[in-house]
């Protein structure tokens, strides 16, 4: 797939014709910007809370 | 013009029904959610958290509609299931279809739109969601206000001497105008103290979300009347004091109309005034408080910074709050539109859980930026006997500015 990844409006995107089973939807640019902003906030949050520790399984699973 | 967040799937316009086939696009869309094994949408759904009912939420509803497409269930079988959504939008944010693959594969999960569509389709075929009578009664009461004397809709501003036109207009909805009048009144006092010249409509039209998910055509007529009235009043900037209306103005109205003005939420507007030095928060408020993000702002339009900045600027306040990402899991329990009337017991449980979270951080006051959250938390406080005091952010800002 990687050779068919394209960049549109600054974001990586798979060419719609490659999407055979689940077709690409029509998304506005503002909606895509919302996804990106949302994802960055989520990953920042994950890093702030979990990047410096290893989460172990509860005792009952050890 | 205003920043807009639009999600619109044209196949949602095709009605579902007991005797209607599910269109292939809808089936494919539902299959995309069904085939996802993450189920992150459940992890953040406040309704699932309380009920542990697997038919709720994004995964449950999409799977049910896929079941309709496969002939296992009919639309009328969803009368109960469809009541179990707050429309808070948490699942949409957390869904990998949107969060990770949205801009890459061009996929988005739009459950809130889907819930509204299914409720409309159920009503249209004469099998409304369970307990819909309570919602219809509320809608009828609101529409009676529209048919009644327009003075009643602006009575909250009788003594405030506001013009009915201007480049900046404050739009006050029926809920604020009738039930939580302190919210718009505080907004007016703060804006006046900051030297802002603005007006209000002499007759606003309904913006009721319950109407949007039952009779979209009628809701759109009122939407057009609101836009027309604001444009005729000369509005270049419209300030909203109800975040439920705010997301209608920035996410729903632009789907159908061109808005000839900017739309801004009151906390964003006040922050810009604060940063420009037009608002001075001088009085100390020695309170121990936490902040509750309204779903409509935090989840639907990712707007969470302005209220926090304003609260932190109030002198003397002891402020402890979960960050906005953690609050994706929360809701006050009111929901965006009809949930509280459809499921009052679950609504109360969700509100109670939010109260207990605020109490865990040692807060004595729970600050909100939404009149519906204020209404819901006031009810939860009364029912539970909690000592936690819900308070609207505008009330605190007015107090800190020294406004009576």
Image (tube, coloured by chain):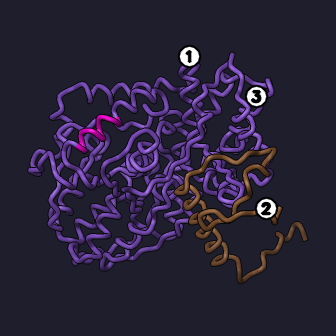
Chain colours: A brown, B purple
Q: Tell me the residue that label 3 is attached to.
A: B69
The residue positioned 46% from the left and 42% from the top of the image is B255
Pick the front one: B371 or B265:
B265
Is residue B161 placed above or below B268 in the rendered structure?
above
Q: Is residue A13 left or right of residue B157?
A: right
Q: Secondary structure at mark 2?
A: helix
The residue range painted magenta reads B223-231
Find out whether residue B113 is within the magenta segment. no
Q: Nearer the viewer, mark 2 or mark 3?
A: 2
Chain for mark 2? A
**Closer to the eye: label 1 or 3:** 3
- Residue A34 drawn at (x, y percent): 55, 60
Of the image marks 1 and 3, the number of the one nearer the N terminus? 3
Label 2: how many Cα within 10 Å (few below 14, some 14–19, many 20+): few
Q: Position of residue B294 (x, y in %)?
A: 45, 55
Quadrant of residue B67 within the rendered picture = top right
Measured Cα–Cα span from mark 2 to mark 3: 33 Å
Check the residue under mark 1 and report the chain it is in: B
Magenta-highlighted stretch: main secondary structure? helix
The answer to whether residue B214 is visible is yes
- Extreme right residue here? A62
Rendered-image quadrant of the N terminus of chain B: bottom left
Q: Can you identify the residue that label 2 sits on?
A: A4
Magenta span includes B225:
yes
Q: Which residue is mark 1?
A: B126
Front residue of B330 and B110: B110
């Amino acid at each position: 797939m990687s050779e068919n990844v394209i960049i549109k409006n600054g974001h990586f995107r798979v060419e719609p014709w490659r999407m055979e089973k689940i077709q690409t939807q029509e998304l506005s640019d503002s909606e895509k910007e919302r996804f990106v902003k949302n994802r960055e906030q989520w990953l920042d949050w994950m890093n702030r809370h979990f990047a410096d520790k290893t989460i172990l399984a509860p005792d009952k699973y050890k | 013009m205003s920043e807009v967040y639009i999600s619109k799937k044209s196949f949602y316009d095709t009605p579902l029904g007991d005797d209607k086939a599910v269109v292939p696009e809808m089936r494919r869309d539902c299959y995309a959610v069904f085939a996802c094994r993450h189920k992150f949408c459940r992890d953040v759904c406040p309704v699932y958290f309380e009920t542990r009912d697997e038919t709720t939420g994004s995964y449950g509803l999409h799977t049910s509609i896929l079941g309709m497409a496969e002939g296992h269930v009919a639309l009328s079988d969803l009368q109960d299931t469809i009541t179990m959504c707050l429309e808070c939008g948490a699942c949409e944010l957390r869904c990998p279809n949107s969060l990770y693959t949205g801009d890459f594969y061009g996929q988005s999960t739009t459950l809130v739109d889907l819930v509204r569509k299914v409720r409309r389709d159920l009503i249209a075929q004469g099998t409304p969601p369970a307990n819909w009578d309570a919602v219809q009664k509320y809608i009828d009461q609101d529409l009676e206000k529209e048919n009644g004397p327009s003075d009643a809709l602006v009575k909250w501003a009788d003594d405030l001497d506001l013009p009915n036109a201007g480049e900046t207009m404050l739009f006050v909805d029926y809920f604020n105008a009738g039930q939580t009048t302190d919210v718009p009144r505080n907004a007016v006092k703060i804006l006046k103290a900051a030297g802002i010249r603005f007006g209000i409509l002499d007759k606003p039209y309904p913006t009721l979300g319950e109407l949007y998910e039952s009779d979209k055509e009628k809701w759109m007529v009122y939407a057009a009347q609101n836009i027309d009235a604001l444009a005729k009043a000369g509005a270049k900037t419209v300030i909203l004091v109800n975040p439920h209306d705010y997301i209608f103005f920035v996410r729903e109205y632009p789907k159908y109309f061109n808005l000839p003005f900017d739309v801004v939420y009151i906390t964003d507007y006040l922050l810009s005034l604060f940063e420009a030095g037009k608002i001075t928060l001088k009085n100390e408020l020695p309170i121990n408080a936490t902040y509750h993000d309204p779903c409509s702002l935090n989840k639907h339009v990712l707007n969470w910074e302005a209220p926090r900045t304003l609260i932190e600027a109030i002198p003397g306040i002891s402020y402890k709050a979960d960050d906005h990402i953690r609050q994706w899991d929360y809701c006050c329990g009111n929901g965006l539109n009809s949930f509280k009337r459809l499921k009052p017991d679950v609504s109360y449980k969700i509100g109670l859980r939010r109260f207990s979270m605020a109490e865990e951080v040692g807060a004595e006051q729970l600050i909100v930026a939404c009149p519906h959250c204020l209404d819901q938390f006031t009810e939860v406080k009364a029912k539970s006997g909690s000592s936690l005091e819900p308070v609207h952010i505008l009330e605190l800002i007015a107090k800190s500015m020294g406004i009576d």
